[in-house]
């Protein structure tokens, strides 16, 4: 075969393959899913994220007609599970929760994931109610009391957090900077472990999403402040950090994603299923039990939110000098 003819044949084959690809993807989507789907939860079992994600997956599995098996792949403030998600085969059979803190960790060089290139976005589903809680027999009746003691004893008041660099750690340090106080952060693998440490008297304070809610209701813990724009719907008597005089707001919505490269028809199927799941009775009830606001966004708007958060985190990293803080 002469050179000209060879190029013509190869070019024709390439054109045919490119033309056939959308048809193959559509056929794949028509049959998807044909087996169970793996959902990677990057937080320990029993924590607030785990509980709500399991309820969400139960509802989504009903929409998809296949089971969704939740696997807890924990560590490194959620980044172990996220790295496994990004590295998975992009066929729609491995999905998982995306910790928004990847927008911070990626810029700190703590995880080799580009949130805008290495992930496919499915939906943002719910927010979190973060707060500062202490045992009911603690000497601090108000946030002002806690700040005064932390100022008087710099670095001696300890707080439990779900890992260095995560939303609870960075949020607490942002609050400490605004208050002119110094606390001693003690990292755990997740909120459930940090809560257990507080209940057991191993740390003085808990900075976490609403893992503390049942114990606050039972009178075992005292909630000193929440971190949102507005007061918690359930704990209306507790001020926000901003109301207490500290201009700090922390919100870290939960989102669902997959590896980059999932075929568009498969991604559309997942988006449809999780949109319905986010409005399901079981998911909304699970969120209500932990006072987590519903914050649904479909994939395009969710991806825009992640991009905007990347920009905000760049400013926060510089303002808090986080690179130095994480090395200390």
Image (spheres, rainbow, N blue to C red):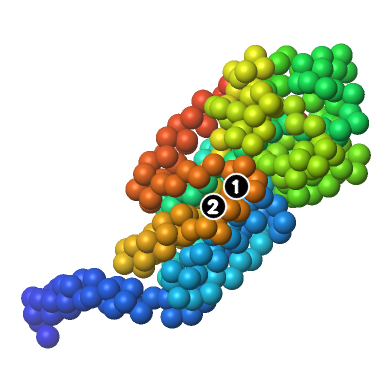
Q: Quadrant of residue 209?
A: top right
Image position of 232 with respect to 281: above or below: above
User: SS for tag 2?
Assistant: helix
Q: CA distance from mark 1 to mark 2?
A: 6 Å
| Contact (Cβ within 8 Å) of mark 1 with mark 2 | yes
Q: Residue 95: percent from the left, percent from the top?
A: 50, 63
Front residue of 285 and 296? 285
Residue at 60% across / 23% down in the picture? Answer: 248
Residue at 13% across / 80% down in the picture? Answer: 9
Q: Give the quadrant of the C terminus.
A: top right
Image position of 98 with respect to 206: above or below: below
The residue under label 2 is 284
Q: Quadrant of residue 160?
A: top right
How packed is label 2: few (under 14 Cα within 10 Å), some, or many (20 or more)?
some
Q: Give left or right: position of 94 versus 239.
A: left
Residue at 42% across / 35% down in the picture? Answer: 308
Residue at 51% across / 25% down in the picture? Answer: 315
Q: Residue 140: percent from the left, percent from the top?
A: 85, 23
Instruction: Identify the disc placed on residue 288.
Output: 1
Q: Residue 79: percent from the left, percent from the top?
A: 62, 51
Whether residue 112 can be seen here: no
Q: Give the quadrant of the N terminus.
A: bottom left
Q: Residue 132: percent from the left, percent from the top?
A: 73, 31
């Amino acid at each position: 075969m002469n050179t000209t003819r060879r190029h013509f044949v190869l070019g024709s084959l390439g054109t045919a393959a490119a033309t056939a690809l959308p048809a193959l993807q559509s056929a794949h989507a028509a049959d998807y899913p044909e087996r169970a789907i793996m959902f990677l939860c990057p937080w320990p079992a029993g924590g607030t994220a785990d509980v709500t994600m399991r309820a969400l997956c139960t509802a989504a599995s009903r929409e998809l007609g296949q089971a969704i098996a939740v696997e807890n792949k924990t560590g490194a403030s959620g980044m172990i599970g996220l790295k496994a998600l990004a590295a998975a085969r992009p066929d729609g059979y491995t999905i998982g929760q995306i910790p928004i803190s990847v927008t911070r960790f990626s810029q700190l060089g703590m995880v080799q994931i580009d949130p805008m290139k290495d992930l496919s976005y499915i939906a943002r589903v719910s927010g979190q109610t973060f707060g500062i809680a202490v045992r009911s027999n603690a000497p601090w009746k108000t946030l002002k009391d806690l700040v005064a003691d932390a100022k008087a004893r710099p670095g001696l008041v300890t707080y439990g957090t779900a890992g260095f660099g995560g939303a609870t750690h960075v949020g607490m340090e942002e609050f400490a900077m605004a208050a002119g106080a110094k606390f001693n952060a003690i990292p755990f693998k997740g909120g459930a472990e940090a809560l257990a440490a507080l209940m057991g008297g191993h740390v003085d304070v808990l900075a976490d999403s609403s893992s503390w809610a049942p114990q606050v209701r039972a009178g075992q813990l005292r909630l000193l402040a929440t971190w949102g724009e507005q007061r918690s719907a359930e704990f209306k008597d507790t001020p926000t950090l901003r109301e207490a005089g500290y201009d700090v707001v922390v919100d870290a919505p939960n989102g669902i994603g997959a590896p980059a490269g999932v075929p568009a028809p498969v991604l559309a199927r997942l988006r449809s299923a999780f949109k319905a799941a986010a409005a399901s009775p079981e998911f909304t009830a699970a969120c209500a039990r932990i006072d987590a606001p519903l914050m649904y966004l479909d994939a395009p708007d969710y991806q825009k939110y992640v991009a905007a958060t990347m920009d905000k985190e760049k400013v926060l990293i510089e303002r808090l000098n986080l690179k130095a803080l994480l090395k200390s």
